[in-house]
Every structure is written in structure tokens, then in C-alpha cells.
Image (tube, rainbow, N blue to C red):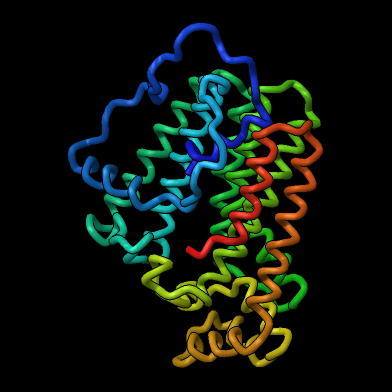
Amino acid sequence: MALRWWRRCGAFCRRAPPLGPAPPLRPPAHGLRGPPPALRAAMCHFPQRSSVWPFPKLCSIPWREVQASQRSVAIIAEMIHTASLVHDDVIDDANSRRGKMTVNQIWGERKAVLAGDFILSAASLALARIGNTTIISVLTQVIEDLVRGEFLQLGSKENENERFAHYLEKTFKKTASLIANSCKAVSILGCPDPKVHEIAYQYGKNVGIAFQLIDDVLDFTSCADHLGKPAAADLKLGLATGPVLFACRQFPEMNAMIMRRFSKPGDVERARKYVLQSDGVQQTTYLAQRYCHEATREISKLRPSPEREALIQLTEMVLMRDK
């Protein structure tokens, strides 16, 4: 995800390319020894399953215009992202991701947890080697948000308005924080202007929330084979996402199902039927459009450039994706 993402982020960090030929691409040394033999197979397995940004290249931005430390941020963001997915699959007892078996299904929960921990430790070392305390603070916030978001997902609210705010806060912490803070980090490394840092953060925040809203829509509108995970997976986990919360306004009887986390026999099927009969999918899609519009408004504050246009196009691709 991240390596494709940061090639589009020149609007935040564009610099004059260095003289002479570019050195070969290499990930930064993180100073960590290779994983134990028992974890190697698992660690080779999950990078193939982790990507959720299957977008084609929007423009050709020479990598020489990106600092080594900014590329390190991209790699660190990918590590955090991948580790969080491995841990999520353990928590959810998921047996597939992107149409393939999960690490925990193949090697068991213990090795999956250890593999995720190992990736996080490598990310922490790589982060420390950047040597910038501000960047360390920004990116460690992502890890804190991921954990807090997981705790938010375990709870629910009885009040309808509080419930939706709870859902959006969880969405930010579990998904959008990674994108927002990573955008902010590369902007800090490339530009001293705090206004640009805030633009980068707000752009990433809004794109990230929109991305997750569309993901929640696809849980109801896309088939399992195309999506790479079982249909209505969130309902089966007891989660009330955007389409469900909007549908609840038209079908108040869903409130009881939400509070018991769709645990009674037939709850999942009934809830899915109510969502499809309501305008929940349309309302959630509209909300995602609003967040993408806000992301576009933020990034448009920067001077015109091919990189800025690529980031605007990215907001459109978030809305159009079908898996």
C-alpha cells in the first residue's frame, strides 16, 4: 500500500532531484536480525495478503524527488499496516483475507501474534533510525490509535447520535489515522511550513475515513469471491457499520440487534435484509463522497502540480473501487 501511496505524495514533499544517476532502490536497514525460522514462512506469507490499495499508477513521479527518510516513512507505514492486519485476523478469528488463507489459519494464533509483533519491532527500529523525534511522535500515535480503535470496536452506544460518533471515531483510529499521520510525517520531512503539515494530515484523514466507509458498503454490495472475504463479515463479527446505522433510522427494530451484536439466530440475515431494503448503502456512499470532497478541498490549497492532481484523482478512485 504505502510504496504506491507515497509515489503520489510529491505535492507534500517535492524537492529538486539530486545530480548524477540514482542509486538502486533498497529498503533502509532496520538493524534487526532476520526472524526466527519458525516465523519466516508466516512473514513471507502475509505481505501478499495485506494490500488494500489496488490502484494503478496515477502519474510517473521520479523517486529521486523523495528523500530517503520519506521512503522510510512509507516502509514503516506498510509495516504497521501489515502487522495490524495480522493481529486483526487473530482477534476476528478470520480464515481468509483477499481470498487467501490468513496467517493464523495456517500457522495458528500464537505464531500469527508473534509475527505481527516482529514486524512492529522492525518498524520501531526503522522509525528510531530516522532520528527525528517529531516523526517518531507522529507515527507512534498511529499505533496508539490502532489499539484504542480496537477497544472502541468492542463497545457500543445505546444513543443513536452517540453511536454514529462512536463509529466514526473508531473508523478514524483503526483506518484513517495511519494515512493521516503518515501524510503528515512525509510533509514534515519535506517542508517546514506547519500549514502544509496540517493540509497533509487533513487530506489523509478524510481519504482514510472515506476509504473505510466504502469498505463498509462493499461488505453489503460485493460478492464474497470478488471481495476476498465472506459477505456480511462485519455483521457476523457483531459490528454495526455505516450502512447498518443509517438503516436503523428506517427500521428501529434493528436497535435491539445492534445492542446484542447480532448474536441471536437469524439476526445477521435480518439485519442484512433491512440494510438492503433501506437507503443505508446510499447514505454511507454519500457520506464517503463528502469526506472525499473535503480531502480534495484541503489538497487544493497547495499550488497546482501533477502530484496534487494525482492526489485529487486518488479521492475519485477511493469512491469507485469495487473490492
From the viewer's perspective, is 95 left or right of 199?
Answer: left
Position in image of residue 276 (x %, y %): 59, 85
On screen, 184 above or below 156?
A: above
Asked if 42 appears above or below 7 in the picture, the reply is below
Q: Residue at x 36, y 71 (%)?
A: 225
The image position of residue 15, as x and y in percent, is: 64, 18
> Nearest the camera: 144 or 84?
84
At a point 81% along the width and 38% down the height, the residue shown is 301
- Point 71% across, 44% down: residue: 203
Q: Is residue 313 visible?
A: yes
Q: How many labels were placed on the picture?
A: 0
Q: Which residue is drawn at the image coordinates 72% and 57% (left, top)?
A: 291
Residue 86 appears left or right of 107? right
Q: Determine which quarter of the picture holds residue 180.
A: top right
| Between 162 and 213, the one nearer to me in the picture | 213
Give the residue furthest to the left.
37
In the rendered image, residue 269, in percent from the top left (x then y), is placed at: 48, 89
